[in-house]
């Protein structure tokens, strides 16, 4: 082999290794991005279902004549305005906060109105909220685990550079 052929062969191997490494990094970044998006969508569905269950409890309370204060009514109205069709991280956090606020409102109303403890329809919705809350906490844990793994790969210098070139960020 001629010296220039050896140099070309080495350069081609280096280019091949660079392209293979780039594709590997891109596939990891794409997998994490898709996984985070899917988990975000599942959290959105769970939060929407929880909102519906809490709205049903609210409707049952109002049909039974439970009196709300202005702040309690405002909190429920804020929760009813939540729309999670294509949520981003900030919308998910805001909706979780609003839902937790309404849970507190409905809990305090149920303490003031002891008859709700024996109402079968409210019991069904309460069980539904508890189940959704359990699933929501598991979903948040999985979402956070994916974000931590994604950020770990971003912390590796070679990955960080390649992922920034692709457009991914922390």
Image (spheres, rainbow, N blue to C red):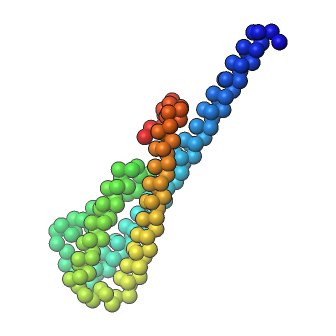
Instruction: Give the residue at x 36% y 52%.
Output: 91
Q: Residue furthest right?
A: 1
Dividing the picture into quadrants, the one containing residue 62 is bottom left
Q: Is residue 128 above or below residue 47?
A: below
Expressed as whole percent of the image width and height from the top left, the position of residue 98 reads 29, 62
Near-viewer residue (159 or 79): 159
Q: Position of residue 38 (x, y in %)?
A: 52, 54
Image coordinates of residue 132 in percent, x first then y, are: 43, 70
From the image, which quarter does the N terminus lie in? top right
Classify 132 as above or below 24.
Answer: below
Q: Quadrant of residue 9?
A: top right
Q: Give 57 or 2, whichever is nearer the viewer.
A: 2
> For this rendering, which residue is in front, 80 or 157?
157
The answer to whether 115 is drawn above or below residue 4 in the figure is: below
User: Image check: 67 left or right of 78?
Assistant: left
| Residue under the image location 31 percent in, 87 percent down | 117
Q: How many marks?
A: 0
User: Residue 14: horizontal and vertical position, in percent?
Assistant: 67, 23
Q: Is residue 88 left or right of residue 71?
A: right
Image quadrant in which you'd find residue 105: bottom left
Residue plotted at (73% across, 15% down): 8
Q: Residue furthest left?
A: 70
Residue that appears at 27% across and 66% down: 101
Quick check: can you spot residue 77?
A: no
Q: Quadrant of the C terminus?
A: top left
Q: Is residue 72 visible?
A: yes
């Amino acid at each position: 082999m001629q010296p220039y052929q050896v140099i070309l062969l080495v350069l081609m191997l280096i280019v091949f290794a660079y392209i293979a490494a780039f594709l590997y990094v891109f596939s990891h970044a794409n997998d994490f991005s898709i996984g985070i998006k899917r988990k975000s969508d599942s959290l959105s569905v769970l939060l929407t279902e929880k909102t519906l269950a809490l709205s049903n409890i609210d409707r049952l309370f109002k049909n039974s004549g439970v009196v709300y204060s202005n702040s309690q009514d405002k909190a429920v109205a804020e929760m009813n305005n939540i729309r999670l069709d294509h949520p981003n991280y900030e919308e998910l956090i805001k909706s979780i906060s609003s839902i937790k606020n309404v849970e507190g409102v409905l809990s305090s109303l149920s303490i003031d109105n002891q008859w709700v403890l024996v109402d079968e329809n409210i019991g069904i919705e309460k069980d539904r909220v508890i189940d959704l809350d359990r699933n929501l906490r598991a979903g948040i844990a999985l979402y956070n685990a994916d974000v931590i793994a994604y950020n770990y790969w971003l912390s590796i210098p070679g990955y960080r550079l390649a992922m920034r070139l692709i457009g991914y960020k922390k």
